[in-house]
Image (spheres, helix red, strand yellow):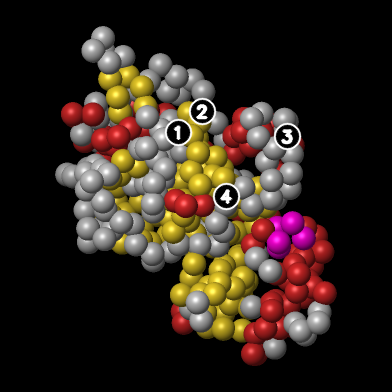
Amino acid sequence: MKLVVYKHDGTEHLGFISGDTVVDPNLGLAADAPERAFFADTVAFIRSAEAGRAAAERLLKNAPASARLPLDSLELAAPARPSTILCSGSNYRDHNREKLNTPISGKEPEFFIKTADCVVGPNEPIVYDAAMSTKLDMETELAVVIGKAGRHIPVASALDYVFGYTIVNDVTARDRQVRTSPEGSTWYELGRSKSFDCSAPLGPVIVTADEIGDPQALKLQTRINGELRQSSNTRNMIWGCADLVHFFSTNFTLKPGMVIITGTPSGTAWSTDRELGGKWQGEPGLVPATRYALPGDVIECELEKIGILRNVVV
């Protein structure tokens, strides 16, 4: 099942992809149908669990023509606007090799947070603000959407708490991230460098976990103006999705609709920035960046079985 949110008359509506159409459940249900509560928004649907899922499947099979809208005619929004996005940095070995590292890089997940204020949807702009950063970098990441509440979740059962998966572009201000001391030690400022307007493009869909299968077997790519900058597979994570659900549940009670992003592989613009410790690895087929992102750049973040998240820098 693939969930989308689309815009119409200034409001956002939950829908489900069916072929080349989107089924809007609230157009397919009677005004007094109790199931309408399941489809109020994405979090309401996630919380509705099996009852909502069964109602959605019935609608996908039996929705009237009036509830089916051409997908290519719709303006999609972010399929979720999580209040909390739990973020893991330095989670691909090849990314660690291409950059200046801190003492914990690759030894434990680097923990930072983005909020709903960072989220933009597919085709919405990423704003280049030179007063904030002139080294704006892009990172395609698999995002885990939590399906039910839990704390101190064991790794062995962690994926039982996952509703589905989407894509997040972890937009990063590298000139605010890398810090070095006079003695030569390095640390990251993961507040101002990671959390700002437009720093979490998210979408275009949420795909339920049953359609993804193994989240550690998905091809990942980033293209900027058509150039292939990143190409990897989620099997190359240091800590897989189950590990990260366990890790973050130590600090937080994970709740339906929360999102965990899982790190990015090599190929970032940082890798060619010697001033900030970049060490381009020259992976076959990748085009090394000659600069950071600028207005006019088209960013495409792609994950197998999910799709392409496209945004333009303005």
User: Does residue 163 appear anywhere in the picture?
Assistant: yes
Up/down of 47 relative to 88, above or below: below
- Give the Cα distance between marks 1 and 4: 19 Å
Q: Residue at x 26, y 35 (%)?
A: 175
For the residue marked with disc 3, what is the amino acid? Arg
Q: Disc 4 marks which residue?
A: 83
Tell me the tag on residue 151: 3
Query: In whole angstroms, how far apart are the C-alphas of marks 1 and 3?
Result: 21 Å
Gap between marks 3 and 4, in whole Å?
A: 18 Å
**Image position of 240 (left or right of 151):** left
Q: Residues within 10 Å of mark 1 (few under 14, many from 20)?
A: many
Which SS does the magenta portion mostly show? Answer: helix
- Residue farthest to the front, as pictured: 131
Q: Position of residue 118 (x, y in %)?
A: 44, 51
Choose top left, top right, bottom left or bottom right for residue 89: top left
Per the model, the C-alpha gap separating discs 4 and 2 is: 21 Å
Q: Helix, strand, or loop for circle 1? A: strand
CB of mark 1 within 8 Å of CB of mark 4?
no
Which one is earlier in the sequence, the residue at label 3 or at label 4?
Answer: 4
Chain-order first, disc 1 or disc 2: 1
- At 32% from the left and 19% from the top, the residue drawn is 186
Assess whether mark 2 and mark 1 are in contact (beta carbons under 8 angstroms): yes
Residue bearing the label numbered 1: 89
Q: Is residue 313 left or right of residue 141?
A: left
Measured from the top left, where is residue 73 in percent x and y? 46, 82
Q: Position of residue 139 (x, y in %)?
A: 38, 45
